[in-house]
Structure formats: structure tokens, C-alpha cells
Amino acid sequence: MNEREPKAGDIATLHEPYLDYRRIELIEKCWYKWRVRICESGKEIEVYEDEFELDD
């Protein structure tokens, strides 16, 4: 597991796919969740930090 803090612009992978998509781009932290953009579709969703792992 990656030890560094996530920041806007980071690319990550969801542990559980959302509509068969896994790769996301972090947009902004909103309280306890992150607003993210699904890389392949452009759709924006909100996820908790424990639902993804940062890519190297």
C-alpha cells in the first residue's frame, strides 16, 4: 500500500470497479470523501480514501 498522502491530480485504482471502470483521477477532497473523475468515461463520483490505492 502506498504511504504518501493523496493529492489532486493523482491517478489511482479503485478496489471495487464502478460500472467496470477502475482507474480514477483525484479532483478534490470534500470532507471525508474525494471527488474523482473516472479516466475512461469522464464521469465524476465521490469515493472514500479506503476505496482506492494510488498508482506509482
Image (cartoon, rainbow, N blue to C red):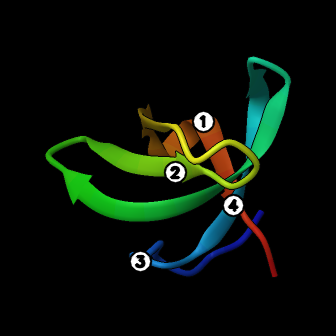
Q: CA distance from mark 2 to mark 4?
A: 10 Å
In this view, the mark in front (2 or 1):
2
Q: CA distance from mark 3 to mark 4?
A: 11 Å
Is 45 on the left or on the right of 15, as rendered? left
Q: Earlier in the sequence, mark 3 or mark 2?
A: 3
Q: Secondary structure at mark 1?
A: helix
Crowd around label 4: few <14 · some 14–19 · many ≥20 (10 Å): many
Numbered label tally: 4
Q: Name the residue at 60% across, 35% down.
A: 51
Read off the residue under disc 4.
Answer: 12
Asked whether the beta carbons under mark 3 and mark 2 sit within 8 Å of each other, the answer is no
Q: Name the residue at 39% across, 75% down.
A: 8
Crowd around label 2: few <14 · some 14–19 · many ≥20 (10 Å): many
In the rendered image, residue 7, in percent from the top left (x then y), is placed at 41, 77
In this view, the mark in front (2 or 4):
2
Asked whether the beta carbons under mark 2 and mark 1 sit within 8 Å of each other, the answer is no
Read off the residue under disc 3.
Answer: 7
Crowd around label 3: few <14 · some 14–19 · many ≥20 (10 Å): some
